[in-house]
Amino acid sequence: MGTLFARSGPGELWGGASDPVDTVAVQLMIGATSILSAEIWDRIDSPPGLPAQRPAYRAAVLAALAARHLLGRGVVTASVIGSRDAAQLHTTVLARHVPGISHLSVYLTDAAAGPQRAAQHDTSDHDTRPHRDLPHRQPSDRPVFDAQLVEELELAGIVLAPAASPAESAFGANLIVITDPVGHDAGDPPPAMHLAKGALLVNVSGQDLPPGVLAQVNQVFVDDLTLPDPTAGHGPTTDTVRRHHRGAHRIAGDLRQVVLGENVGRADPDQVLLVELLSSRTAAAGPTHPTDGAPPAHPGAANPPRKPAPATPPVAPRKGPHMSHEAEIRQFIVTTFAPDVPAEQLPADLDLLDNGLVDSLGLLRLIAWVADRYHIAVEDQNISPAQFSSVASIAAFVEESHSLV
């Protein structure tokens, strides 16, 4: 389903590639039982110009998925803290697949102290921009990112602000991604990092965060509660994370539950949420996603092994002898998205997307329901949002799909 929700924009940053975040969500909604399963990631190719290493790219996509589903609405001010290569990868994926980013502050753990230049071609007029880097500090010789990425961020309206410390980078940000350990070098004190209200912190470093940072967290999520132990007792897994967070930071759920609506995710706009990517902790020990698409539950997981479940609750009645596809689809839409609207008052030709009745996440849910209800392998078809824009177009899609069988 390479053309589904293909995003376009200036430069090669948006290059027309399919959206891997949407691909993960759709596959979960149509039956994938683990967010790390091969049935999902075999469908996702690293775009040209990005590292081909699957664990690194997968971590960046999962960070973007967490941002889409756990951030509050509004403008996104992001912070990326880590080595240059990892930070550049995460910045690229965030800029492509997380809407609403206005500012991006970066601290490179493998660069000399002091903010780095934004790009090799920087000129003095950049000093007048509202960056959070301090003008009296002298930049290092090495730019933060490749000039092409910086230029494309500028075309997208994203202000890039190098930072002199992790604390400076994270200050005021509502999305913080940590890709490499900070404050763990010999003689380095743990960073005094202040997290803003409503912030989402994604830990991709593979190590525990400093206690001062964890003390500000209200809820903890992980990428997959059923992550298997990759080695016989070696390396941190779900048990380790649970012990580290103890009762004060009970693991609230995983990203699969959030995407499917089984977990409410952010219950309070002021809560500080932490997403621990357990797959980053075990990546060095081998592949973290099983080949059969259904991993066994880890002994430390809170939930029992999952059985494949329908993508959405069966809120709409099964089609009876006197209910047409159109009537059944109309009933599902009003039950799910407009419970106060009588089904007979929803016009068949009303554009659900243009009128705001169904948003992008709702569209994914609608596609997943159609796939499950009518036994249509949507991932094998070249579908587009226009086919799901109204009751009539969805019914036509169902009829056409059945006629091809």
Image (cartoon, rainbow, N blue to C red):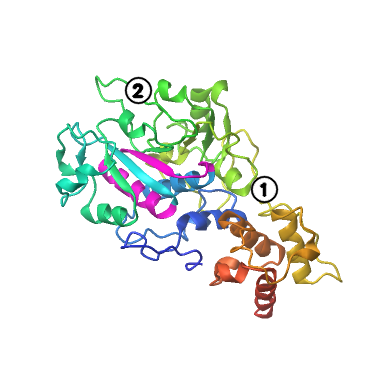
Mark 1 and mark 2: Cα distance apart in space = 43 Å
**Which residue position holds label 2?**
192
In the image, residue 359 lies in the stretch drawn in magenta: no
Q: Residue 307: which disc? A: 1
Q: Is residue 373 visible?
A: yes
- Residue 301 picture quarter: top right
1 or 2: mark nearer the eye: 2
Q: Give the range drawn in magenta.
A: 70-97
In this rendering, position of residue 240 left or right of residue 13: right
- Identify residue type, mark 1: Lys
Label 1 sits on a secondary structure element that is loop
Residue for point 23% across, 33% down: 134
Q: Percent from the top left, x then y, of residue 330?
A: 74, 64
In the image, residue 96 lies in the stretch drawn in magenta: yes
- Identify residue type, mark 2: Ala
Badge 1 density bin: few <14, some 14–19, many ≥20, Cα 10 Å:
few
Q: Percent from the top left, x then y, of residue 110?
A: 23, 36
Q: Percent from the top left, x then y, of residue 332?
A: 74, 60
